[in-house]
Amino acid sequence: MDQELTEIKVEGGMEEQNQQQSNSTIRREFKHFDIIPANSIASDHHYFASPATLSSPSYQKKIMKEWRILEDNLPDSIYVRVYEKRIDLLRAVIIGPAGTPYHNGLFFFDIQYPSDYPNKPPTVCYRSLLNTWHGKYKNEKWIPSQSTMLQVLVSIQALVLNAKPYFNEPAYAESPQSSDPWKTNSLLYNENAFILSCKTMLCILNTPPTFFEEFVVQHFRDRDDAILTACKAYDTGRARIGDQLTTNAATGIQNMPSRTFKTSMEEIYPKLVNSFAKNNGSPNGIMDTSSASDNRSPNGITNTSSASVLPSIIGKCILGVVLLLFLILIFIVFHNSILS
């Protein structure tokens, strides 16, 4: 995963156009940390319309220190863009960790430093997926003399985007994770988290955040097969939602999801297929798949066409007619022999 992403590049954070015109995908380096020039700004940033915080020399010094920490220490799964024109703003994307219901997803956070930073923590906005959750322990809270933006981002990844997010909720944090009803509730929570993650993928593909357009395209080109494979495995019960998939996955149905999950997946799966196809340059979002099930149903059951089923039905009918005529012939011969 990491080697693939480090080969992507966005010059100055701007998307290069017409990449789909090439038969081969051009892969460029995508920096983990980059500064957007003063002549560009992300107007879709959640805090863009907010007044810029006072840019005193001491404030600038503190922010520049944060930038250096981020540039030198970001993990492979986190990417950050800051703005030369608005040093109080920052945008980060975290790749959902493997082994969690958020795997292969992209989670964008818009952040603003307050004017009295670091005495007060930065304001973080994530739209539509994660519920607000406040850390319980001391090292999960903002400590002006110790805390950094890097710690905030790493904490979000570790404490929120984890394998059992149900237990992030303060009311259930101390509950026994291996006992019911908490274990069952956790599995249902993971189902909902994965569905929301898939919906977020669709939104991001449709409207990628500014200065991350090419990153989004390449990310899902690299991972679309893995995402669709996971959808099928979860829907058919061949894997528990969030578990890492292996090539030797159990063939038995051991972890059947809820009816609600299966219904949601029936709606989302075709949309994912079409969105991934468009992302890969297919006209009209039609994916060139080898089996009919790939763009119809996540359960892996091929919806065979009438052209393939009809010959089999006709053959059986002919065999039945021949057998019937043979029995009638035997009956006539036997009846005539009795009469004679």
Image (cartoon, rainbow, N blue to C red):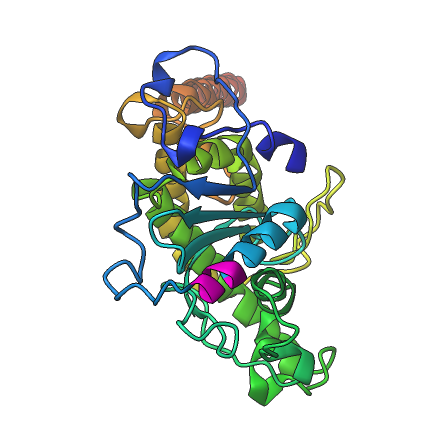
Find out whether residue 61 is within the magenta segment: yes
Where residue 183 appears, x then y in whole percent?
Answer: 66, 77
104 lies above or below 6: below
Residue at horizontal 60 percent and vertical 46 percent from the top: 71
| Horizontal side, residue 274 vs residue 189: left or right | left
| Horizontal side, residue 288 vs residue 85: left or right | right
250 lies above or below 301: below
328 lies above or below 249: above
Magenta segment's dominant SS is: helix
Residue at horizontal 48 percent and vertical 12 percent from the top: 24
Farthest residue, direction top? 23
Where residue 42 appears, x then y in whole percent?
Answer: 31, 47
Where residue 291 appears, x then y in whole percent?
Answer: 48, 26
Q: Nearer the viewer, residue 87 or 325?
A: 87
- Answer whether residue 197 is visible to the viewer in this image: yes
Find out whether residue 13 is within the magenta segment: no
| Horizontal side, residue 253 vs residue 92: left or right | right
Farthest residue, direction front? 57
The magenta region covers 57-62
Q: Quadrant of the N terminus?
A: top right
Residue at horizontal 58 percent and vertical 57 percent from the top: 65
